[in-house]
Amino acid sequence: MAIPALTVELAALWKMDAVQIGWLGGIYFAGYAVALPFLTGAANRMDGRIVYFAAALISAATSFGVAIFADGFWWALAFRFAAGIGFAGIHIIGMKLLVDRLSGDAQSRASAFYTAAFAIGSGCSFLVAGFLSTLFGWEAVFIFAAIGSLLALPLLALIGPPLAGNELRSNRLFPDFTSAFRDWEIIRYVIAYAGNLWEVFAVRVWFVPFLAYNLAMNEGSGLGLEPTTAVGLSVFIAVPLNLVIAELGVRWGRKPVIFVVSAASVVVCIILGWQASGLYVLVLGLLLLHGITSYGDVGAIAGGVVAASTPETRAAALALFGLIGFTFGFLGPLAVGLAIDLAGGRGEPVAWFWSFLVMALGSVVSAAAMAWKPKSKVRC
C-alpha cells in the first residue's frame, strides 16, 4: 500500500487530479483481477509454491521499477498494474497454500488470521512509508517494498505438503468457475467480498488525502499525528477486532454478524461525510471506527467462502472470490475520485460528503448479500 501512503506527496509532484489518484490507487487491484484466473489455474497444474515464488519476484521487480524509472503518472500506472499481477500470485495463492494444509473449522479460522496478517502488513506499509519518505525520499519506500517481497521467498521452504485430498490437480487453463457459480453460498460471500473491498480499498486510497484536507480546515489541531501514522493506527485497531468478529461468525452465524457490521459501516460513512470539515479529533475518531466497521468483517467473509467450498470447488471459489472482489477493489477508489472531481475537487466539503456516500455503497452490497434469500436453498 505504498502508493496510498504517498498519495498527497505524489499528487503534488506529478500534478494529479482526483480521478488520476483514483486510477493510481486502484490499478494495482485491476492487475490482480486480470492475472488471478491464470495464476489459480497454474496453481492447480503445479505446486502452488512455484506460482507464489514467481509472483514474489514480479512484485519485487515492479517495486524496483517504480523507484528507478517512474517519473510521472503513466509510468507509475504501468508498474502498479504489473505489481498487482504479482500480488495476485501472493495473496490468494498464499491462502490456498494455507487452507490446503488444514481441515474443518481450522480452515475458516486460519483464513481469518491470514486476512489479519495482510491487514497488519498493509498497516505497517503506511507507517514505514511515511517514515522512509521523510528520511530518504519517496523512492526509498518502493526499494524497501521490493526487499520485503524478496524476504518472503526463503519462507516457502518451511511449508510442508498439503493434507491428503485437499490439493486436487487439474489440466485446465482456468479453474472451473461454473462449479462455484452453481453454489449459492459461495456466490453470497463473493458478492459480500466485492462490496467489502470496494469500501476498504477506497478508504485506504483516500484516507491520507481526506485527513490532509481536514487538517487544512483545522489548522493547528493535528495532535502531532501524521496522516500515514493515523492510517496505520486504524489498521492495527481493526485487526484484533477482525479476528473477534470472525470468531463470532463461527459461533453465532456469519450472516447476521456480517450484516450488522456492514450496516454499522454505512452509518459511520454517512456521519464521516457529514462531518468532513468537523473537528479533527472527531473526524480521526470516526476514521478509526470506520477502520473497524469496514475491515472488521473481512475475516468472517473469507471464512465463509472457505467453509462454503469443498476440495473440488475450492480453487474456483477462491479464484472467483479474489477476481470479483479485487475488480471492485479497483473500481471503488476510482469511483470515489470521480465523485470528488464532479463535486468540485478535494478542497470542497461537499466533495468529501459524496465520496463517503460512494464508499458506503460497498457495505450496502455486503449487507444485502447476507440478507439475500435465494428461491432455492439447495446448491445447484
Image: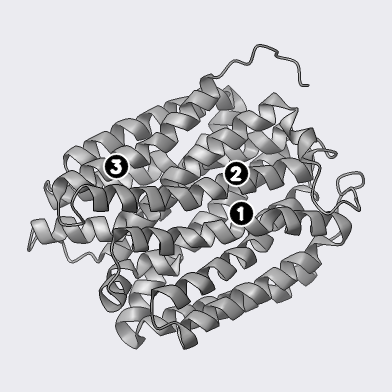
State which tag comes first along the sequence, 3 or 2. 2
- For label 1, the residue is 33
User: With 207 as the anchor, is 310 left or right in this view?
Assistant: right
- For label 2, the residue is 324
Q: Amino acid at mark 2?
A: Ile
Residue visible at 65% across and 31% down? 187
The front one of 286 and 66 is 66
Residue 254 image position (x, y, % from top left): 57, 27
- For label 3, the residue is 356
Residue visible at 80% across and 47% down? 175
Dots 3 and 2: beta carbons under 8 Å?
A: no
The span from disc 2 to disc 1 (Cα, nearest Å) is: 7 Å
The span from disc 1 to disc 3 (Cα, nearest Å) is: 24 Å
The front one of 61 and 135 is 61
Residue 223 image position (x, y, % from top left): 15, 61
Question: Where, by quadrant of the figure, is residue 211 drawn?
Answer: bottom left
The dot on residue 156 is none
Residue 192 image position (x, y, % from top left): 54, 34
State which tag comes first along the sequence, 1 or 3. 1
User: With 132 as the anchor, is 309 left or right in this view?
Assistant: right
Which residue is the extreme one toward the top? 375
The front one of 120 and 139 is 139
